């Protein structure tokens, strides 16, 4: 967020901490608990403090469980806002919107692809005679002596 101020960063950090604590200690919705480990990865607050985007990372890879978890977060939003309001002294508690943070899963996919490429290169280096394809012709020697 380019228009972020010290105050919005501080409030976003406080909201992130409070949402994490609330999810850990107070939310017992099975839609959220069934998706395994839930981590609040980031919170973005608008400059006017009316809205906050809460990004969560889930340990599940199942798309249906992710959708169910988002529904669980939506159902718990009023309770979570109440907890934020009780712990932070704000004139107005931001409206919360929850989003699945796919950064970790994308990073894992990229790492797996890089591992595959590395393994292919290791196999290719271990068998150098297989480097040339059947369509490539071996280099021919040319001699400067034509006598």
Image (spheres, grey):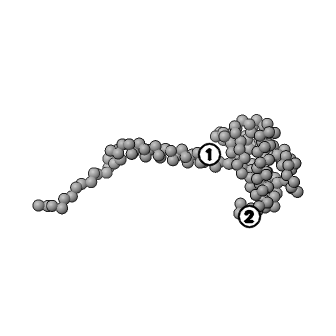
Q: Residues within 10 Å of mark 2 (few under 14, many from 20)?
A: few
- Which of the two residues, 15 or 67, is positioned nearer the viewer here? 15
Q: Position of residue 125 (x, y in %)?
A: 39, 45
Placement of 18 over or under 47, stated as above or below: above
Quadrant, the N terminus: bottom right
Question: Mark 2 or 1 closer to N-term?
Answer: 2
Residue drawn at 50 percent across, 44 percent down = 115
Task: Let me know if residue 66 appears in the view.
Answer: no
Secondary element at image label 1: helix
Q: Nearer the viewer, residue 114 or 72?
A: 114
Residue 127 in view: yes
Q: Relative to residue 93, is residue 38 drawn left or right?
A: left
**Image check: 1 left or right of 84?**
left
Task: Check disc 2 and report the residue beneath it.
Answer: 3
Circles 2 and 1: CB distance less than 8 Å?
no
Quadrant for residue 49, please give it: bottom right
Q: Position of residue 53 (x, y in %)?
A: 75, 53
Name, please, the residue furthest toward the left: 147
Could you say which disc has been placed on residue 67 in the image? Answer: none
- Give the CA distance from mark 2 to mark 1: 28 Å
Q: Position of residue 91 (x, y in %)?
A: 88, 57
Q: Could you tell me residue 2's position as x and y percent?
A: 71, 63
Q: Which residue is drawn at the image coordinates 77% and 54% (left, top)?
A: 12
Tell me the residue at 76%/50% (across/down): 16
What residue is drawn where x is 79% and y is 47%?
18
Indicate which disc residue 105 carries.
1
């Amino acid at each position: 967020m380019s228009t972020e101020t010290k105050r919005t960063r501080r409030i976003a950090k406080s909201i992130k901490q409070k949402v994490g604590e609330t999810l850990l200690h107070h939310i017992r919705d099975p839609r959220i608990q069934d998706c395994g480990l839930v981590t609040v990865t980031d919170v973005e607050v608008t400059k006017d403090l009316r809205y906050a985007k809460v990004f969560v990372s889930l340990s599940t890879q199942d798309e249906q469980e992710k959708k169910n978890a988002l529904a669980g977060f939506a159902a718990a939003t009023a309770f979570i806002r109440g907890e934020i309001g009780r712990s932070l002294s704000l004139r107005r508690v931001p409206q919360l919107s929850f989003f699945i943070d796919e950064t970790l899963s994308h990073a894992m996919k990229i790492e797996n692809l890089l591992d595959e490429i590395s393994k292919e290169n290791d196999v290719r280096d271990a068998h150098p005679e297989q480097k040339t394809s059947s369509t490539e012709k071996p280099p021919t020697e040319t001699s400067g002596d034509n006598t």
